[in-house]
Image: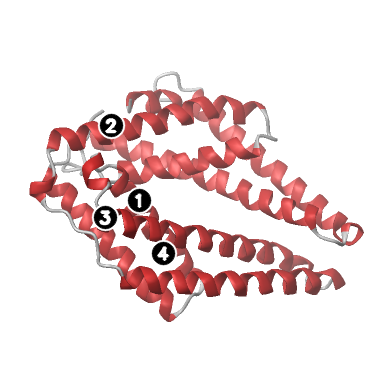
Amino acid sequence: MTLSSTSKEFVMKMEENVKRVDNRVIDYIEDSNENNIHDIRTAIRRLDASCSSLPRELRGRKKICKYVTTSKRLFKINSQIRDYDIICEKLEKYSSEPIYTKLTDSLNRRRKTKLASARKMALSLKDLPLPHISENDLQSKKLEMRFNKVVHRLCERIELDLPIVLTNANKIKELHEMRKDCKKLRYLLDLVPHQNNNSIGYKEMHKMITELEDIQDMLGSIHDSDITIAYLNRVRHPNEVTYILHDEISERYKKYENFIQFCKRSLSDSRHNFLNQIALLT
C-alpha cells in the first residue's frame, strides 16, 4: 500500500494538525482540566505523525524540529499527569477506606508539581512560531518513500510484538510499546485521503483503522491497570493496600483475557485477519 496523497493534500493535513495543536495549547493554558489534557495529547500525536512522514531535510528544519520537540516534551509531562488521574480514579471505589486519603493526597501533590511544569512548557510552546511547509517544499516521490518507510517500520514492530504479548501476559513493556505503535500507525493512516467512501481501498483502510483503535483501547486499559499495580507495589503501606492490589490484578487479568479473545477472533479469519492486514501495509 502506498501513500496516494499529493503534496498539496499533505500540506493541508500538516497545517490542520499544527493549527489543532496551537488551539489546544491555548485551551490547555486557560484550563488544564482532564478533557484539555486528553485533547492536547491527541493533537500532539497527530502532529507527530505528520512530521514523522516528512523527508529528512524538512524534519530537520529548525522551526519544525523545535516545535515538535517542545510539543513532545509537553506530551510526556501530561502523560504522567494523566497516569496520576487514572490511579486516583481507580482508587475512588475505596474512598471509604483510611488509606484512600493518604494515597490520593500524595498523588495530588505530585500532580500539582507536574502540572506547574506542564503549564510552563505549554507557554513556551505557545510562544514558538508555528512550523510551516509549502507545496513547493515537497516532492511527492520522497514523501511517499518516507511515509511507506515509517509505516513499514511500525508494522514490523507490531508483527514482532503481537505473538509475544499473546503468549505472555507479563510482557508489560511489549504490551505498552505495541499500544503506542498501533496509535502511531492509526494516525499515519489517517493522513491518507479517502476520496471514495464506497471504494474497496477505503473499506479496507477503515477496517484497519477501526481494528487498530480497538486494540489500542484494550491495551490502553491494560496499561492503566499496570501503572496502578506498579504504584500500589511502591507505596509505603503494603498491608493496607493488599486487597486493593488484589482487585486491580484480577481486573487486569480479565482485560488481558478480553484482548486475547479479540485477537483470536481476528486471527481466525485466514484472509482478513489482523496480521494479514498489517502485512498488506508493507
Residue 222: x and y in percent read 63, 46
Q: Which residue occupies 57% across, 42% down?
A: 176
Q: Which residue occupies 61% across, 75% down?
A: 112
Q: Is residue 103 left or right of residue 263?
A: right
In the image, which is nearer the foreground, mark 4 or mark 3? 3
Decide which of 282, 44 is in the foreground and name it: 44
Q: Residue furthest front?
A: 62
Residue 230 can be seen in this image:
yes
Q: Residue furthest top?
A: 270
Q: Is residue 25 left or right of residue 201?
A: right
Of the two numbered discs 2 and 4 on the same chain, state the one appearing first in sequence: 4
**Residue wearing tag 2:** 148
In the image, which is nearer the foreground, mark 1 or mark 3? 3
**Residue wearing tag 3:** 62
Decide which of 123, 259 is in the foreground and name it: 123
**Residue wearing tag 1:** 48
Of the two numbered discs 4 and 3 on the same chain, state the one appearing first in sequence: 4
Give the residue type at disc 4.
Ile
Q: Is residue 105 left or right of residue 163?
A: right
Give the residue type at disc 2.
Asn
CA gap between label 1 and label 3 equals: 15 Å
**Residue wearing tag 4:** 40
Q: Residues within 10 Å of mark 1 (few under 14, many from 20)?
A: many
Q: In the rendered image of this protein, does residue 276 appear above or below residue 99?
A: above
Q: In the rendered image of this protein, does residue 127 appear above or below residue 187?
A: below
Decide which of 67, 219 is in the foreground and name it: 67
Name the image quarter holding the N terminus: top left
The secondary element bearing badge 1 is classed as: helix
